[in-house]
Amino acid sequence: MKRKYFFLLIFLALILPGAGHTQDVKAIDSLTVEFWPDYDRASVLVLLTGTLPVNTKLPASVTLPFPETAQLNAVARIDDTDGIMKNDIFYSHAPGEIIFITPDLRFRLEYYFPYAANNNQRTFDFTWLADLSVKRFQLKVQQPASAISLTTVPPTKNMLRGEDGLTYYAFPVQSVSAGQSFSVNVAYTMTTAKLSVESLAPANTNVQEPGLPSTLKADEGINWPIVAVVMAGIILVIVFVWLTITRRASFNRQITHDAKAKKKSPANFCRKCGKPAAKADRFCSNCGSSLEGRA
């Protein structure tokens, strides 16, 4: 029985180091950053859709830059089985960065940040600077439905019409090293204050809508790797305590048995032949010697 629990302890010792380990991502395979100004709110909706390298050990911890003036909209994983965004992952954010743990290679981060407005003129700046490298990095800007004369710095001539009928400005795909910054300035003129979502046809179901607001925050999300460590630790403690109690009880039983055996042992014996004798005996029943002065 003890051998059985000994092997259980070895098994737990082996799985504990890996149960709570999450790989800190140092590189992203692809990342697309889209800007949707005046889409469903009078601000800029930013959508970051990324894919981790195929050799990434999951679950993985991802740290991305997060503007201090930004308002979080969604943190989600993109399920590899059905391609659906699911905002059931653990995350926490502090000024300047956001950290989340994903069990899938693909993820989505969404937030809003304000633009500068001067009458009908709108302008905003964005700078990418992170402690991780991106193999394929691309920026895209959605022109608001009510906007004209959209310009970008640096400029891009790659314009395309999306399935939603809106115009998109796409920058060339490039690699970005860790610590390398990339900045863009966007300016446009609004003809009316009408938001883009109000101009989209309801029947157009192919439009990729932004995700639902995230509900799992750092203080209420479930971090399954940590849960696994805690549960394994509890099991380990229970087994250790059980083995300690069992060993102590066995030791106490042995002491009691020895004490009883000693108590039952004859206190007198024949000094000549060593035969045990009762207290009332005067002569040895084995050799007949007198038991006077016996031990």
Image: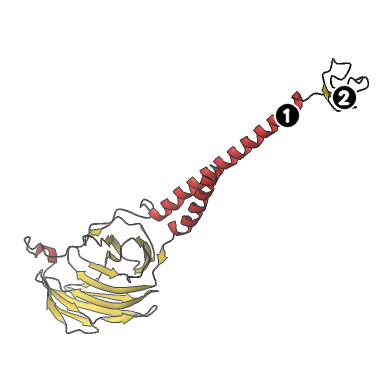
Q: 196 above or below 150?
A: above
Q: 165 above or below 103?
A: below
Tell me the residue at 84%/19% (across/down). Answer: 285
Q: Kindly tell me whether residue 195 is visible in this rendering.
A: no
Q: Which residue is mark 1?
A: 259
**Element assignment for label 2:** loop
Q: Position of residue 124 (x, y in %)?
A: 25, 74
Q: How many numbered circles are shown?
A: 2
The numbered mark at residue 174 is none
Left or right of 295, for residue 264: left
Q: Amino acid at mark 2?
A: Cys
Q: Position of residue 158 (x, y in %)?
A: 16, 82
Tell me the residue at 13%/65% (across/down). Answer: 207
Q: Amino acid at mark 1?
A: Ala
Residue toward you, 88 or 80: 80
Q: Which residue is mark 2?
A: 270
Q: 242 above or below 18?
A: above
**Which of the 4 image quadrants contains residue 240?**
top right
**Which of the 4 image quadrants contains residue 55?**
bottom left
Tell me the residue at 10%/62% (across/down). Answer: 205
Badge 1 density bin: few <14, some 14–19, many ≥20, Cα 10 Å:
few
